[in-house]
Image (cartoon, grey):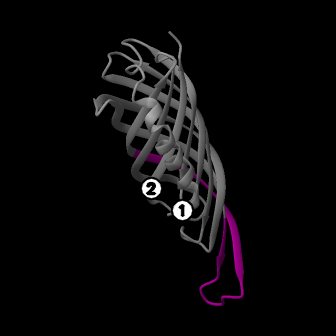
Amino acid sequence: MRSHYILPILLCVSLSSIGQDQNPPLPINSSSFGIEFQAYPAGIMPGIVFEKQFSQRHGWHARIGANLADRHDWGKHDDETGSGYGATLGYRYYFETFNQNFSVGPRIDFWQMKIDWVGSNLITITNTMTGTSDISIFQPTLELAWWLPFKKGAYEIGVSITNGFEINVKTEGEDVGEGLISLIGITARKSLN
């Protein structure tokens, strides 16, 4: 297990007893605003999030954020690093099990990134090549989250696991890595109602 997954897991375990006796999820037609941090093996994605729940079970959410990547040699070159900005649109279905609040739903991320890469010439390993690729990424995923309400539901902390695909839909420069993606995230949000 990679070390950047440990903090969200420890937070999830340590807060489990606090969330059991709290109030239910945000009320119907509520809005919330907060911050979200996701980590994946090749980088991190911090951002700000807004959610509108149109019933106690259903909500739409949006995020704007940054994507900071260090792919090492997992891409198509010996080293790929870069950053960019993007947005997320998603849907959450909320349900309660064992006095805990969970949600599940699809997310779609769009990222615009600049990736610096280093590679070796296939003919002579001693000739190192470098370059930069501008990529547009389409990232469909499925999120499972666990929510802990505080202060009569005015605040919530969510811990999530998200899996899906990272697809380079447009590339200017050499091709760079894409494929399956798994993320662990934490969200802190406040009700605006």
Q: State left or right for residue 158 relative to residue 29.
A: right
Q: Quadrant of residue 96?
A: top left
What is the three-letter code of the residue carrying label 1? Arg
Residue in the picture at 71% in, 79% down: 128
Is residue 16 visible to the viewer in this orientation of the structure? Answer: yes
- Name the mark on residue 94: none
Query: Is residue 22 within the magenta segment?
Result: no
Q: Which residues are magenta?
A: 117-140
Query: Is residue 128 within the magenta segment?
Result: yes
Most common SS among magenta residues: strand
Q: Tag 2, which secondary structure?
A: strand
What is the three-letter code of the residue carrying label 2? Ile
Camera-side residue of 60 and 138: 60
Is residue 167 visible to the viewer in this orientation of the structure? Answer: no
Q: Which residue corresponds to mark 1? A: 2
- Name the mark on residue 181: 2
Cα distance in 3D space between marks 1 and 2: 14 Å
Q: Tag 1, which secondary structure?
A: loop
Camera-side residue of 107 and 77: 107
